[in-house]
Image (tube, rainbow, N blue to C red):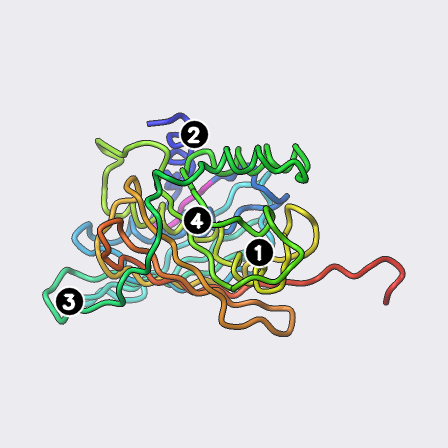
Amino acid sequence: MSQALQDLLDLLDLEQIEEDIFRGRSRSAVVPRVFGGQVAAQALVAAGRTVPEDRPAHSLHAYFLRTGDPGAPIVYTVDRIRDGRSFTTRRVVAVQHGKPIFHLSASFQTYEDGLDHQEPMPASPDPATLPTGEERLRGYTHLDPLVVEKFLEARAAVDLRYVDEPPYGKYGEPREPHSQVWFRTNGKLGGAADEPLLHVVLATYVSDMTLLDSVLLAHGRGGWAVGDVVGASLDHAMWFHRPFRADEWLLYDQESPSAYGGRGLGQARIYTQDGRLAVTVIQEGVVRVPRERGTS
């Protein structure tokens, strides 16, 4: 296991300060605020720690309410909404400086047999044939070296490989609003860390990294890395269909059906390398074009 992955696991290991109350810390992100995937992942950890282990998470729905302060702890309060015979529901509110910054509802279910079908996995190259994130980023001479280092630091725990050029790698002309990345943790999980909830939590963490890329591609924008848009996540939903491991290759197939009114919508499916549909993800975010100086 890499040190970066161990640091991420430590970040997600919340401190319990009272029954159903947990405290988490933050770390630096690509932008000067708490990374949304971190808050979502920590909130899911808090919820999961109040649920029996034989009830894995099957869905979450979340809203990002305020910008998180990376220099302050985050307190997560869990409400035990319902404990049924098959389903358990939890609500989590994340608070900083006395104000809620994030709200999550999550549902957990005992395993049961049922109908089974799925959308087929789309075509994609073998991830082993693709350049690593570091190889791509260090090859972009148009990017500020400080930006490159921030990206590498923020994603050091994840081996994330783009199938095609990311928005910040090739921009200026609209492209198809579709993006694929392969990802896995930068190291294997084992021992006490190898629990089903953690794999779901890690996928939640990564899911916020690239989902709005397809919005940028549709308009030839490079994103924050080149300063031609400003944005932030607004809401985030995930459905966990089948078991998977976050330390094995997962294909994140993403597209954008719409952008309007300063908002962009991204939707995606996550597949295991052997073709099983593991997760569906939908997110809407603020995507604004900065106004030029002197305009009102």
Does 133 lie within the magenta span? Answer: no
The residue that mark 4 highlights is: 163
Q: Give the amino acid at mark 1.
A: Lys
> Whole-Å distance between the Cαs marked 4 and 1?
40 Å
User: Looking at the image, is 134 positioned above or below residue 95?
Assistant: above
Q: CA distance from mark 4 to mark 3?
A: 43 Å
Image: 288 above or below 152? below
Q: Quadrant of residue 183?
A: top left
Q: Of the residues shown, which amino acid type is indicated by label 2?
A: Ala
- SS at circle 4: loop
Report the label total: 4
Q: Which residue is mark 2?
A: 4
The part of the chain drawn in magenta is 20-24
> How many other residues sit within 10 Å of disc 1, few (<14), some (14-19) or many (≥20)?
few
Q: Are marks 3 and 1 in contact (CB under 8 Å)?
A: no
Mark 3 closeness class: few <14, some 14–19, many ≥20 residues within 10 Å:
few
Q: Amino acid at mark 4?
A: Val
The spot of residue 231 in percent (x, y) is 62, 58
Question: Which of the two marks, 1 or 2, is nearer to us in this view?
Answer: 2
Task: State the residue position of label 3.
Answer: 85
Q: Secondary structure at mark 1?
A: strand
> Residue 282, located in which quarter of the rendered image?
bottom left
Mark found first going from the N terminus, 4 or 3: 3
Q: Which mark is residue 99?
A: 1
- Secondary structure of the residue carrying tag 2 is helix
Residue 153 to residue 46: above or below:
above
224 relative to 18 in the view: left or right: right
Answer with mark 2 or mark 4, whichever residue precedes in sequence: 2
